Amino acid sequence: MDQQPADSPYHRTLPIGERLDPTPLLEGPLTRFEDVRLPPLAEMLVPEEPRRGVEDPSACPHCQRHPHRIWEDDTWHVDAGWTRMGLPYVGGLAPNEHCRLDDAPPHVLASLGPLMQRLSLAIKQVPGVARVHFSRWGDGSEHVHLWALARPAGMMQGRGAMLAFWDDVLPPLDPAMQEEHLRIVAEALAADGGTAYPTRQ
Ligand SMILES: [Zn+2]
Ligand SMILES: [Zn+2]
């Protein structure tokens, strides 16, 4: 791919190649880093590499009804458990049809709010969960999706965006506990509509 440095008034202000001072990451009210070393700010090249699902829609993970789909209805589905979980629950939420946020149809957008509330309440039924945080990044897969992350009760070090970092380093749930947590969420969602474990025999 023939890439060029991205150019905009913003880009022209950036200290490309320099190692930036990480002090704000150490001193912010919600940070829990004691030491951070960032790589030098890399060149920003365009066009960017395409996201998953752009060049080969058949490889889009959210378009496949894989075994980690723990709940679905006619419009949305929830995936969880395909990887280690250090938090009590981490999972994805995506529409069944392949779309981007930019072109998602009105019925998908309109049903997202009520479903976020249902999913939050379902995850809070898992023992030890205080709050449910949602994130929407969109740099991996083109298919629009959100993440839901459960913050353990009393874990003040896990407030805010730090929670995603803790998920990577907390000890993984043992398989029986992970299965139990996913079952609680799937069945709580299905109690108000849709199907728990639609891809299981
Ligand atoms: Zn999915
Ligand atoms: Zn897709």
Image: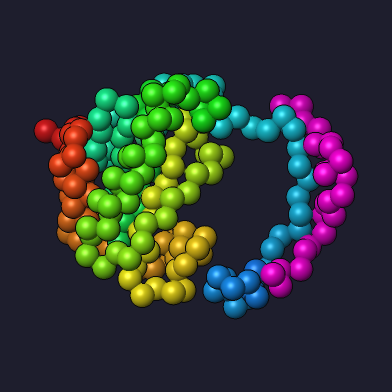
Q: Residue at x 56, y 32 (%)?
A: 51
Q: What residue is shown at x 18% (from left), y 52% (from top)?
A: 184
Q: Residue at x 52, y 60 (%)?
A: 161
Q: Quadrant of residue 75?
A: top left
Q: Where 154 sits versus 85, above or below?
A: below
The quadrant holding residue 88 is: bottom left
Span of residues in magenta:
1-24
Direction from residue 1 to residue 74 in the image, left or right? left
Any part of residue 103 in sight: yes
Res. 189 image quadrant: top left
Residue 119 at x, y percent in the picture: 30, 46
Q: Is residue 70 above or below residue 107?
A: below
Dominant secondary structure of the residues highlighted in magenta in the image = loop
Residue 63 shows up from this direction = no
Give the residue displayed 39% in from the left and 36% down from the top.
Answer: 112
- Residue 179 part of the magenta segment: no
**38 over 65 or under it: above or below:** below
Give coordinates of residue 187: x percent, y percent.
Answer: 16, 45
